[in-house]
Structures are given as structure tokens and as C-alpha cells.
């Protein structure tokens, strides 16, 4: 596990061009794919830039001190002996000081304390800002009833502010067409059946007034929740648009058994506008504080990843990404797919579903390379946009 000092050493080597080609390429790829890592690098560049500027100010201050010392030495009366008479006379050095030098000396004498205080305040402000940024970032990761940090992403704050302004204008002028709402949060969801049922995490849709499902090819569908399993952080949505004709055969199977410890796993999600791929391994067959309904996986997840599919090497669905433990490096949690199967079975038995659930039983991804698997999967993984009333 890398410490903060290790990260700073790596970033410093990168900024000075000391990394070899493969290491540099790997670092740049991670900066592009991992928002948390990119934010850590941005903090490093901000801190080092500030310290560099502070060092330059200190050097300038030392130079000014040197000039001031030289002026004071020149200002002291110099006694010149006259050998012939044994008499002495005083030379006034002020006659040799230019007007510019005198102004500089007067400025430094009057402001050297102020400059020192300003430099100290600047350094304190930098560290206070960095601390504030860290507190702000942590506040954006919402704690939940599951004991760890859930990964719902807050979006469109600026657009929301603009919408509020437009709505105020609309109240004044009734002839203006009302502005459509903007989404407050987003997460990830994926197709559960070919008939239009979607799975996501319960905390993603919690408090939603309306939902919009958006795919990679700009397909947009309205959806509604049909069932929620709060205890296991699962929610099932149904597409309500009449234009929707079905997904066709899903390429992955839903695994009802347990996955193996150490098994290689991967996920797709929307921590940003483009779909992001992550891979790692199954590091524990239980989740936070030993909860057997969840897996622990070594995949970095970020706000927006919640509700994404967790798949094994053969492309079988083994879990639904839920959140992460904030004090453990890359420790993420996912609800086991066996609980999703139980949920679907219980719905079918109680006739709560408005249409039958036909879970995919046979996958089509086994034996394919990872790029080919991802190409097929992207059509079935969506952004779940959540709208709430003001």
C-alpha cells in the first residue's frame, strides 16, 4: 500500500521527467481513468507550486536583506587618516547614495516586518485551503446505513443554479415556458432482463421523484422503481417508455452461487460522463464488518459507480457495486448476485412484478478477450439519473 510520501515521490519524479517510458505511460493512464488519483496529483501540483513561489519570495527577501546590510555598512562614518598631519576627517557616504537606492532602503526599513508576516500568512492559507478541500471531498462521500461510504454522485450544481434563476423569471413572466428539471444525483444501473427491468443500488434512487436511464448511444428512457431491498442495497426499476421494445438477449448470466476468494473480477460504471472500466480481485467473501450478503473487492470505486455490475472473468454477473470503506485503500463492497436472484424469485412468487422476470441463464462472454467483452457489455450498462423536487 502506497503512503502519501510514496505518492508525492512518484508525482515529483513525473513532474521532473524522471519516470521511464512505461512507468510514465501507466501513470498518465491512471490519471485519466481514476478521478481520485487525478485529484491527488492536482493537490500535489498546487502544494508544490505554492511552496516554490514561497521559496522564491524567501530568496528575494534574503537578497533585500543583503542590500539593506550593505547600505547600513556604507552609511556608517568612515574615518580616513591623514599621515602628514595625524588628523582625521569623516566621509559622508550619503553623498554617494542614489535617489533610487535611498527609496529602496526607506521602503525596506518600513515594510520588512509586513513582508515577513505576509509570507507566513500565505503559507498558513495554503495549508488551510488543502485541509478544507480534504474535508469538502470527504463530505461529498455520503455515509449510509450500511456502515461504509455509498457512491452516489452529485451532479449539475451549476445547471441547477441556472435553472433556479430561470424559474424565478418564469414566476414573473407566465408566458415563458417552464424550464425542465435537472438531475441532482446519478449512479449506474444495468439490464436485469430483456423486458426492460434495470438493477441499481437502493441508495442511488433513494428520495427520487423521477428517474431517467441513459445509455452509451444516447438512448434515454423514463423508469420507475418496482421494488427495493433496503437491507441489501438493491433496487429494481422498470422502463416505462412505450417506445422501448426490449434489450434482446443479455450477454451475461446471473450467478446464483458464491464466487471464489482471489478470483479476478471487473466492473463498468459511470463515475463521470463516459463509462469507466475497473478490474481487481475478490479479496473477501464477506463485506463490511463481516456482512455475508456482500463481497469485498480490490477495485477503486468513486461516486457514480454505485449500482454497477460486478463480473467474473467469464463475464458472469456475481454482484452489484454498493460503496467503499473510506479508511481502507481500494476496499469496495458489492451485494452478492445470489441475493438478487432471491429477490427476483420472491417477487415472482408474490406476483409483485407487472411483467415476468426472465433472468439470463447462459452467458455469451466466456472465452472472449476483455475488450470484446466490454464492447458487448456497454449496451446494457446505464447512467441512472435521479431527479428530486426543490
Image: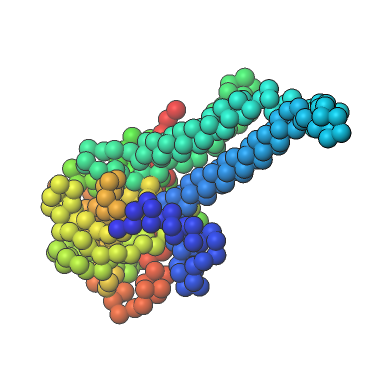
- Residue 49 located left or right of residue 85: left
Nearest the viewer among 271 and 202 is 271
**Location of residue 256 with respect to 82 vertically, above or below:** below
- Residue 277 located left or right of residue 109: left
**Location of residue 219 with respect to 316 vertically, above or below:** above
Q: How is the image coloured?
A: rainbow
Q: Position of residue 373 (x, y in %)?
A: 36, 72
Residue at the image position 28 percent from the left and 76 percent from the top: 366
Q: Quadrant of the C terminus?
A: top left
Nearest the viewer among 306 and 132 is 132
Tell me where residue 312 sits by quadrant.
bottom left
- Residue 241 visible, this angle: no
Residue at the image position 34 percent from the left and 78 percent from the top: 368
Tell me where residue 282 sits by quadrant.
bottom left
Residue at the image position 47 percent from the left and 57 percent from the top: 11
Q: Residue furthest bottom?
A: 367
Residue at the image position 32 percent from the left and 69 percent from the top: 251
Q: Position of residue 199 (x, y in %)?
A: 30, 52
- Residue 61 visible, this angle: yes
Tell me where residue 263 sits by quadrant.
bottom left
Nearest the viewer among 85 and 141 is 85
Amino acid at each position: 500500500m502506497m503512503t502519501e510520501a510514496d505518492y508525492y515521490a512518484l508525482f515529483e519524479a513525473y513532474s521532473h521527467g524522471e519516470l521511464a517510458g512505461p512507468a510514465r505511460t501507466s501513470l498518465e493512464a491512471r490519471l485519466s481513468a481514476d478521478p481520485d488519483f487525478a485529484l491527488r496529483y492536482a493537490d500535489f501540483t498546487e502544494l508544490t507550486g505554492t511552496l516554490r513561489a514561497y521559496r522564491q519570495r524567501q530568496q528575494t527577501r534574503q537578497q533585500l536583506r543583503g542590500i539593506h546590510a550593505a547600505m547600513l555598512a556604507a552609511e556608517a562614518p568612515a574615518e580616513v587618516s591623514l599621515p602628514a598631519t595625524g588628523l582625521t576627517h569623516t566621509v559622508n557616504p550619503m553623498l554617494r547614495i542614489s535617489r533610487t537606492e535611498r527609496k529602496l532602503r526607506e521602503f525596506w526599513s518600513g515594510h520588512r516586518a509586513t513582508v515577513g508576516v505576509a509570507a507566513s500568512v500565505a503559507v498558513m492559507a495554503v495549508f488551510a485551503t488543502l485541509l478544507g478541500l480534504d474535508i469538502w471531498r470527504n463530505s461529498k462521500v455520503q455515509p449510509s446505513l450500511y456502515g461504509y461510504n455509498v457512491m452516489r454522485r452529485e451532479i449539475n450544481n451549476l445547471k441547477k443554479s441556472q435553472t433556479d434563476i430561470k424559474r424565478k423569471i418564469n414566476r414573473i413572466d407566465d408566458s415563458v415556458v417552464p424550464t425542465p428539471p435537472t438531475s441532482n444525483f446519478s449512479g449506474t444501473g444495468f439490464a436485469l432482463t430483456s423486458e426492460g427491468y434495470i438493477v441499481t443500488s437502493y441508495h442511488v434512487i433513494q428520495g427520487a421523484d423521477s428517474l431517467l436511464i441513459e445509455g452509451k448511444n444516447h438512448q434515454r428512457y423514463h423508469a420507475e422503481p418496482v421494488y427495493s431491498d433496503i437491507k441489501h442495497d438493491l433496487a429494481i426499476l422498470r422502463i416505462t417508455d412505450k417506445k422501448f421494445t426490449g434489450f434482446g438477449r443479455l450477454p451475461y448470466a446471473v450467478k446464483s452461487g458464491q464466487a471464489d476468494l482471489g478470483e479476478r473480477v471487473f466492473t463498468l460504471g459511470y463515475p463521470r460522463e463516459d463509462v469507466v472500466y475497473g478490474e481487481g480481485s475478490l479479496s473477501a467473501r464477506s463485506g463490511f464488518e463481516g456482512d455475508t450478503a456482500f463481497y469485498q473487492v480490490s477495485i477503486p470505486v468513486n461516486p457514480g459507480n454505485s449500482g454497477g455490475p460486478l463480473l467474473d472473468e467469464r463475464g458472469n454477473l456475481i454482484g452489484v457495486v454498493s460503496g467503499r470503506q473510506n479508511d481502507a485503500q481500494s476496499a469496495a463492497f458489492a451485494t452478492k448476485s445470489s441475493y438478487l436472484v432471491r429477490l427476483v424469485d420472491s417477487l415472482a412468487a408474490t406476483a409483485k412484478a407487472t411483467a415476468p422476470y426472465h433472468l439470463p441463464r447462459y452467458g455469451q462472454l466466456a472465452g472472449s478477450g476483455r475488450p470484446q467483452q466490454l464492447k458487448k457489455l456497454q449496451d446494457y450498462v446505464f447512467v441512472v439519473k435521479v431527479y428530486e423536487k426543490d
